[in-house]
Amino acid sequence: MAEYLYLYRSGNRPGTPEQMQQTMQKWMDWMKELGAKGHLKDAGHPLEGGGKVVHAKSKINDGPYAETKDLIGGYSLIEAKDLSHAAELSQGCPILSVGGMVEIRPIMKNGM
Amino acid sequence: MELTEHFFREEAGRLVPALTRLFGLHNLALAEDVAQDALCQALEVWKHRGIPADPRAWLLTAAKHRAIDILRRERKRLAFAPDLAFLLESEWTLAPAVAERFGPDALRDDQLRMMFSCCHPKLSEDARVALVLHLLCGFGVGEIAAAFLSGRAAIEKRLTRAKRVLARSKSLFDLRQDDVMPRLESVHRALYLLFSEGYHGAHPETSVRRDLCVEALRLVSLLGQDPIAATPATDALAALMCFHASRLPGRLDAGGELTSLTEQDRSRWDRDLIAEGHRLLERAWDRAEPQARGPFHFEAAIAGAHASARTAEATPWPAIVALYDGLMHLRPSPVVALNRAVAIAQADGPEKGLAAIEAIADRDALKGYPFYAATLAELELRRGQTRAAQAHFQDALRLARNPMEKSFLEKRAALAAQR
């Protein structure tokens, strides 16, 4: 088993409370399934939209620079056999049905 | 931890009034945005971290922090609730003043005040009901449009206009200072319409209709908890809703089709709601002088008489006729007169019932109402006039307003044809 980071990018915000309820249910089901199969190493956290980008010589800008559609909204840590397995596991992610995407990055480790 | 079925909707209906109270009614749009942000924050965090032990408390805290942020940041630029301004201006009193608005009593109070504000005299009854669903029940435009089988654009426009009317005042309606009684009547009427849309409405999905009834019951019980709003008329309206709601499980049969009162499986009626209805009705009746008893008193008493009859045969028809007499006296209408005639037919036979229909002064007003023709059909059928009955059933079928009514009438008509 190897570890992978899921970066959840953008996706439309649900508009009405009832849509939020449905979105919540989908995420709970999805996370529960990942966890039950032993793939969820850490459910991770959501990220705030704004932040800072720090450069050399104390130059600090408001950030991140990404376009809204590429903004990282949160992350989770996953365990999978290999990259294609990790990709397969992400297929059920609810963000895919609201115009978002999942970026998958292998965690680099010793001896791999 | 699992969320209740409509958690986000219910909480939106609590947050928007509380935030509107703080920001002032003229900042309604801001209050809605802040409520939306708090709900979104809950959604994002809970996706990853799971639902907390007390999701409601979590959400109230999130909303409170956002409110304090905004009040602090914008107080130079925006004028907030005038009656709270002195508390919101000082850093010493800001946080406690906001915290107070999120306590259980204040949350209830602000929902009530919002309910009264939504029933603004400048708004149509449809607009009031739409606003109540939107601001107090957390329904989105699409859900309101679906519930009323109306177009999204029409509801959107109705809400935008209505909100503009509300935003002309700075404060929510104040039950302790404003002229409550006339406004309370409009609130009753809006809740009655909301309930009726659920109970009699044409929406094919039972769950949607049940939701409307549940919301109306919840809001009327909020009225009942307030010392000023808990009038005998409020109790009577709540009783009426309890009696009708008790029949919801039996009214739609297994296939979701309408079943007439006499044929319903009464074992499926909700006994707890019936008991609650009787408790409220008794209080409504005792607390009002005879001349102060209004239409809701009589409507509730009629519904209660039906609800308490263990079998259709045990229905106390003469008592129901007397109650219809009372209702006709207070609020005469052709539909009430028709229902009275049905009760007379049950008490004294179909001939008397038909005579009572003949005697309805503005009978022509009923011509477009499918249950007028259906009633004539049933009464003709009962006195053996099969042909006349069939003709009336055909009239009724032509007038049916939705598939459920149509299928109900078709079954009755088929029965007449067999005789």
Image (tube, rainbow, N blue to C red):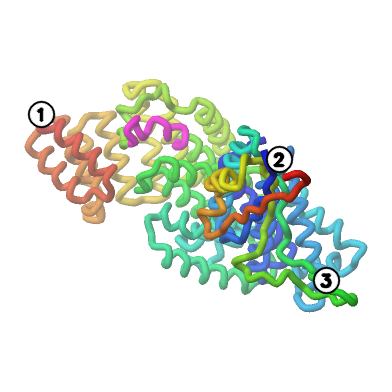
Location of mark 3 (residue): A54
Q: Is residue B356 at all visible to an observer of this figure?
A: yes
Residue at position x 36%, y 24% in the image:
B265
Q: Chain of mark 3?
A: A
Residue that sits furthest to the right in the current view:
B92
Residue closest to the eye, B344 or B311: B311
Q: Earlier in the sequence, mark 2 or mark 3?
A: 2
Q: Is residue B185 at all visible to an observer of this figure?
A: no
The reply to whether dot 2 and dot 3 touch (C-beta < 8 Å) is no
The percent coordinates of residue B210 (x first, y second) are 46, 41
Q: Which residues lie in the magenta part?
A: B244-256
Counting the numbered discs, the total is 3
Spatial CA distance of label 2 from label 3 is 30 Å
Q: Point out the frontmost of discs 1 and 3.
A: 3
Quarter of the image for residue A1 reads top right
**Residue A39 counted in the magenta span:** no
Location of mark 2 (residue): A41
B407 relative to B38 in the view: left or right: left
Residue closest to the eye, A68 or B205: A68
Residue type indicated by callout 3: Val
Task: Provide the secondary structure element on which disc 1 rests.
Answer: helix
Residue at position x 75%, y 54% in the image:
B62
Spatial CA distance of label 1 from label 2 is 69 Å
Location of mark 1 (residue): B418
Residue type indicated by callout 2: Lys
Q: Point out the frontmost of discs 1 and 2.
A: 2
The percent coordinates of residue B128 (x first, y second) are 51, 60
Residue type indicated by callout 1: Gln
B366 relative to B395 in the view: left or right: right
Residue closest to the eye, B262 or B70: B70
Give a yes or no on whether discs 1 and 2 share a subunit: no
